[in-house]
Image (spheres, grey):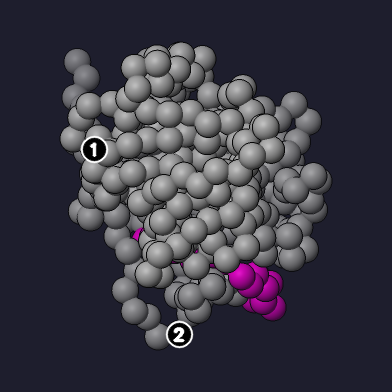
């Protein structure tokens, strides 16, 4: 489901002549990238944020917006979308500018120590520091490999559900064996505002990576004739009057049958691509950026990497680990931005200066 963005919180970039001069560019608007904006903001460092997706939230919103997360400190449970919304609210005082739907294609170090950065949409920056918070890279859906089928991509062939209402009352074929495939099959098969006319789930084997409870519910609905499950693979398609009308499904018995449909939903997962980051001259180990554990700096002075994109001894790919890395990276970047300023550690509970940048009143203690 496409996230509902609070435009009062998210400031997107306006047209701009020439490179945008800034202190920091954050690559990635997932939870760690958003918290990097917060840690920079506490040090009075303004940031521009770039993300290949069309909205903030990264993997949390792209893969599991409604799934519960239990390991955020002091938050017993929240969804990926709720976590993103709360982070956006938290960084609101710092006025970050977002550049969605574009990848960073060029990073070049200039003689004055700044970096020239350009995106796939031609947006250009001159920045003193770069923070790479790109998760495991830019996500691209793993596609269904059937010759000619791609001409229906974006119309009758979909790799994610942006608006569930688009599928209401339709004959749906859903392909996949993971959580996304099962979750959406159950969503559209059960009675509710988005109930489909029919739902047929296709998976290459009678075993699933999805949650056991979802698999059990799917089998229950099949027994009640509320949906169907077919073991097989899509090997072709039929069309009528230029529209996709059916999928050719080859079963485990070797027989190919035509399954009529209005819409084809494919959930083979998302493939992370390191993309242009691999060409920036950074030290890479198994598609991750090597960093130190003092400042989470890369081998290029002024470029930092936080979150799942980085690697170091003992690295754990957890959101809370990324949050910790953001704090140290911000302090590590401060000398590049304020070379003549001594940076002191201050606490948001007691510092009048931090209360000022956060836009809150300082408490009065007896």
Q: With 78 as the anchor, is 275 left or right in this view?
A: right
The number of numbered badges drawn on the structure is 2
Residue 18 circle label: 2
User: From the viewer's perspective, is residue 58 above or below residue 52?
Assistant: above
Question: Is residue 8 shown to the viewer in this render?
Answer: yes
Describe the element under mark 2 as helix, strand or loop. loop
Q: Are marks 1 and 2 in contact (CB under 8 Å)?
A: no
Of badges 1 and 2, the one in the foreground is 1
Residue 109 position within the rendered picture, expressed as x and y whole percent measured from the top left: 68, 72
Asked if residue 102 lies in the magenta stretch, the reply is yes
Describe the element under mark 1 as helix, strand or loop. loop
User: At 27% from the left edge and 50% from the top edge, which residue is drawn?
Assistant: 166
User: From the viewer's perspective, is residue 258 above or below residue 120?
Assistant: above
Residue 80 vs residue 85, the one in the foreground: 80
User: At 69% from the left edge and 48% from the top edge, which residue is drawn?
Assistant: 297
As measured in the structure, the alpha-carbon distance from the residue carrying label 1 to the one carrying label 2 is 47 Å
User: At 63% from the left edge and 55% from the top edge, which residue is drawn?
Assistant: 145
The residue singled out by tag 1 in the image is 194
Question: Is residue 338 shown to the viewer in this render?
Answer: no
Mark nearer the N terminus (1 vs 2): 2
Q: Which residues are magenta?
A: 97-114
Residue 169 position within the rendered picture, expressed as x and y whole percent measured from the top left: 24, 43
**Quadrant holding the C terminus:** top left
Q: With 125 as the anchor, is 309 left or right in this view?
A: right
Crowding at mark 2 (Cα within 10 Å: few <14, some 14-19, many 20+): few
Crowding at mark 1 (Cα within 10 Å: few <14, some 14-19, many 20+): some
Residue 265 vs residue 360, the one in the foreground: 265
Residue 139 position within the rendered picture, expressed as x and y whole percent measured from the top left: 56, 51
User: At 67% from the left edge and 32% from the top edge, which residue is drawn?
Assistant: 253
Residue 265 position within the rendered picture, expressed as x and y whole percent measured from the top left: 45, 46
């Amino acid at each position: 489901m496409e996230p509902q963005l609070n435009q009062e919180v998210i400031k997107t970039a306006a047209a701009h002549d020439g490179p945008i001069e800034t202190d920091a560019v954050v690559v990635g608007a997932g939870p760690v990238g958003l918290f990097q904006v917060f840690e920079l903001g506490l040090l009075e460092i303004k940031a521009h944020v770039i993300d290949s997706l069309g909205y903030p939230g990264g993997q949390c919103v792209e893969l599991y917006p409604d799934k519960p997360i239990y390991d955020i400190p002091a938050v017993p449970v929240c969804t990926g979308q709720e976590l993103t919304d709360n982070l956006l609210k938290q960084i609101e005082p710092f006025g970050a500018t977002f550049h969605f739907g574009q990848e960073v294609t060029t990073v070049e170090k200039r003689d004055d120590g700044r970096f020239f950065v350009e995106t796939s949409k031609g947006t250009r920056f001159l920045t003193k520091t770069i923070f790479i918070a790109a998760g495991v890279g830019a996500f691209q859906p793993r596609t269904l490999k059937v010759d000619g089928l791609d001409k229906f991509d974006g119309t009758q062939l979909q790799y994610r559900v942006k608006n569930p209402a688009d599928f209401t009352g339709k004959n749906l074929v859903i392909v996949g064996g993971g959580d996304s495939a099962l979750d959406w099959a159950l969503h559209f098969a059960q009675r509710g505002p988005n109930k489909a006319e029919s739902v047929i789930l296709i998976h290459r084997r009678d075993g699933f990576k999805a949650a056991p409870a979802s698999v059990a519910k799917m089998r229950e609905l099949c027994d009640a004739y509320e949906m169907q499950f077919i073991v097989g693979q899509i090997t072709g398609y039929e069309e009528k009057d230029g529209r996709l009308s059916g999928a050719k499904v080859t079963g485990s018995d070797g027989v190919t049958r035509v399954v009529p449909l209005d819409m084809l939903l494919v959930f083979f997962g998302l493939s992370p691509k390191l993309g242009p980051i691999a060409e920036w001259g950074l030290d890479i180990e198994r598609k991750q950026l090597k960093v130190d554990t003092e400042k989470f700096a890369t081998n290029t002075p002024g470029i930092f990497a936080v979150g799942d994109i980085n690697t170091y001894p003992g690295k754990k790919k957890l959101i809370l680990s990324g949050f910790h890395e953001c704090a140290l990276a911000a302090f590590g970047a401060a000398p590049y931005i304020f070379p003549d300023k001594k940076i002191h550690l201050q606490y948001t509970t007691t510092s009048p200066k931090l209360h000022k940048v956060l836009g809150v009143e300082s408490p009065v203690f007896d």
